[in-house]
Image (spheres, grey):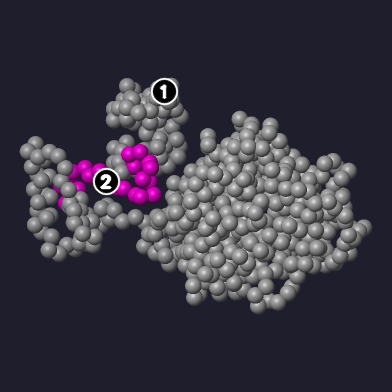
């Protein structure tokens, strides 16, 4: 064991698809890989949990977190045990829902597989997921699909592998899950064709049938498969880096927590995302980079109806930021701005509120997830966003003055009674010294000192740096705004740079505004900015081959040259000297 987790603890958090189904050829591939299976999927969603989270956290958050963790894991443990006793395995968790799968070894055995999964669903409903007592009981919504299941193995980073579940079978289960009510089992038409002669059903709607009863299906429990040490090392790369770090903590056994978080759901649609693995790999890599840079963590991804779904959370344990709502909005805006291919579209939902954060599952199959009203609201907002980024009222209120919004609108949101007030973020509104200055009071001496310094510099009598410092709120920014206005009124060129804690790992970020103004690109983005930069360097051919070194510093996408690839390979002093030369 290292820190708080050993090899077996890592394996507990791996998808059952990796442990039970995938081949080494896919999990060790040096390029994105695809595996296709036939089988049946069961979607199960716990309802009633959000209300209990709010109720139990009112008086004592720590005790409430422990109580919530015990209840949810006991309930989820029963659910997982039923699935495994009927030959299934858990493929993924997402919030308070899971996807379980049954693999059909051959097309001839698909009917048996669908029968087994539907019988498992009925047993779950009978024993743990019926209507029950609405006061404190948790309930289940269940949907079952049958057909093609796809596992996509991606490599978004050199030290990170990523698994995405997709296929028509998942689309069926997802569709049924959206339609089902508490205590219901909805079976897709494809699955019903396989099990209809053994089952009774009713209330056919939108490609599903409500399962009322089904003949018993004998099944032998399949023992959870464990991987040898070498295979476990290989599969660990599928765990997000943040989860690996959290599990290695000496306090890894204390993963349950109730805290205020901001949840972000992103839907990206585009052509051939389920077949063009290189394109999908780039989208996932971009999502991981943007969310990570802004201080969030991606907890779940999936392919639904040809689109990529990303679930990210800002404010998890270990993340010390006071502006998580702002960070989530900035992440969504940046992802949207970076989708420069015309057929790609992004919709997103963002919500802020108290949620349960912790391990969910059993001793041998679990995931680290976040459950609560904010997660449900963000997911529902994303489902109606239709190409926009929508945030709830709590998120908009928390970021007032930092983000410019359009709205509000009152929207009809599936699963929510009455209308939901939503806003659409347009851009970040960061106050800089370019903002028009207010009237200054009691700052004549300081302004005179700054003006005198510039006058001496104009005569060649002053060089160096002048620093304005003081306590927060004393008027440093107002003083500088007035000074900048005075300089520009005199015809001086003023170049402005600023720092941002979100961009603390971006080289030369404080100089971004300065360099962009010197290059004449201002707020231009994408191809327009790159074209303008190349026009600038057309008059300085001796430096043109080094221009791609500015990509990170000023957010460009110039193609690397032989020289810049060599600089990146050697790094260190050579790269710095070349950047300075530019």
Residue 254 visible within the image? yes
Q: Give the CA separation, mark 2 to mark 1.
A: 31 Å
Q: Is residue 382 left or right of residue 334?
A: right
Q: How many marks?
A: 2
Give the image quarter of residue 81: bottom right
The magenta stretch spans which residues? Answer: 485-509
Q: Where is the C terminus found, in terms of image quarters?
A: top left
Say whether residue 192 is magenta: no
Q: Nearer the viewer, residue 358 or 517?
A: 358
Residue corresponding to mark 2: 496
Q: Is residue 471 left or right of residue 385?
A: left
Q: Secondary structure at mark 1?
A: helix
Q: Is residue 282 left or right of residue 494?
A: right
Residue 413 visible within the image? no
At horizontal 61% and vertical 30% (from top left) the residue drawn is 30
- Seen as rendered, the residue at the extreme right is 197
Tag on residue 566?
1
Q: Position of residue 360 (x, y in %)?
A: 61, 58
Whether the residues at callouts 2 and 1 have beta carbons within 8 Å, the answer is no
Task: For marks 2 and 1, give the one nearer the viewer.
Answer: 1
Q: Secondary structure at mark 2?
A: loop
At horizontal 74% and vertical 40% (from top left) the residue drawn is 36
């Amino acid at each position: 064991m290292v820190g708080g987790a050993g090899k077996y603890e890592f394996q507990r958090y791996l998808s059952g698809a990796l442990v039970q189904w995938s081949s080494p050829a896919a999990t060790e591939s040096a390029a994105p890989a695809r595996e296709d299976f036939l089988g049946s999927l069961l979607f199960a969603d716990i309802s009633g949990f959000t209300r209990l989270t709010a109720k139990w956290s009112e008086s004592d958050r720590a005790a409430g977190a422990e109580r919530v963790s015990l209840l949810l894991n006991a309930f989820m443990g029963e659910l997982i045990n039923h699935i495994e006793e009927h030959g299934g395995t858990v493929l993924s968790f997402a919030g308070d829902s899971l996807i379980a799968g049954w693999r059909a070894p051959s097309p001839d055995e698909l009917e048996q597989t669908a029968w087994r999964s539907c019988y498992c669903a009925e047993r779950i409903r009978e024993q743990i997921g019926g209507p029950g007592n609405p006061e404190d009981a948790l309930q289940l919504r269940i949907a079952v699909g049958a057909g093609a299941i796809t596992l996509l193995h991606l490599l978004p980073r050199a030290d990170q592998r990523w698994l995405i579940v997709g296929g028509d079978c998942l689309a069926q289960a997802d569709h049924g899950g959206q339609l089902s009510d508490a205590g219901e089992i909805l079976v897709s038409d494809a699955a019903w064709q396989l099990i209809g002669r053994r089952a009774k059903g009713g209330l056919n709607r939108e490609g599903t049938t409500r399962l009322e009863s089904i003949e018993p299906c004998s099944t032998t429990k399949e023992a959870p498969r464990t991987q040898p040490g070498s295979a476990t090392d290989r599969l660990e790369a599928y765990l997000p880096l943040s989860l690996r770090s959290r599990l290695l903590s000496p306090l890894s056994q204390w993963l349950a927590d109730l805290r205020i978080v901001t949840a972000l759901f992103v839907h990206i649609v585009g052509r051939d995302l389920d077949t063009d693995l290189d394109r999908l790999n780039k989208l996932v890599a971009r999502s991981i980079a943007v969310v990570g840079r802004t201080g969030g963590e991606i907890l779940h991804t999936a392919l639904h109806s040809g689109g990529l779904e990303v679930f990210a959370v800002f404010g998890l344990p270990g993340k010390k930021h006071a502006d998580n709502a702002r960070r989530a909005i900035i992440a969504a805006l940046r992802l949207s701005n970076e989708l420069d291919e015309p057929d790609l579209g992004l919709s997103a939902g963002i919500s802020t509120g108290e949620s349960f954060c912790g391990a969910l599952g059993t001793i041998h199959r679990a995931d680290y997830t976040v459950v609560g009203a904010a997660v449900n609201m963000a997911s529902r907002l994303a489902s109606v966003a239709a190409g926009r980024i929508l945030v709830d009222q709590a998120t908009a209120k928390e970021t007032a003055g930092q983000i410019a919004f359009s709205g509000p609108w009152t929207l009809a949101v599936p699963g929510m009674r009455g209308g939901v007030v939503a806003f659409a973020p347009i851009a970040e509104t960061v106050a800089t010294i370019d903002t028009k200055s207010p009237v200054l009071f009691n700052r004549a001496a300081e302004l005179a000192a700054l003006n005198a310094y510039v006058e001496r510099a104009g005569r060649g009598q002053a060089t160096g740096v002048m620093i304005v410092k003081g306590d927060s709120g004393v008027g440093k920014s107002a003083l500088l705004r007035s000074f900048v206005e005075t300089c520009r009124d005199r015809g001086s060129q003023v170049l402005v740079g600023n720092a941002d804690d979100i961009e603390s790992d971006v080289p030369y970020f404080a100089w971004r505004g300065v360099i962009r103004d010197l290059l004449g690109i201002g707020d231009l983005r994408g191809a327009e900015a790159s074209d303008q930069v190349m026009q600038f360097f057309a008059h300085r051919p001796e430096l043109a081959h080094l221009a791609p070194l500015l990509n990170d510093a000023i957010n460009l996408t110039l193609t690397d040259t032989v020289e810049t690839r060599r600089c990146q390979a050697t790094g260190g002093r050579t790269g710095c000297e070349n950047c300075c030369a530019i």
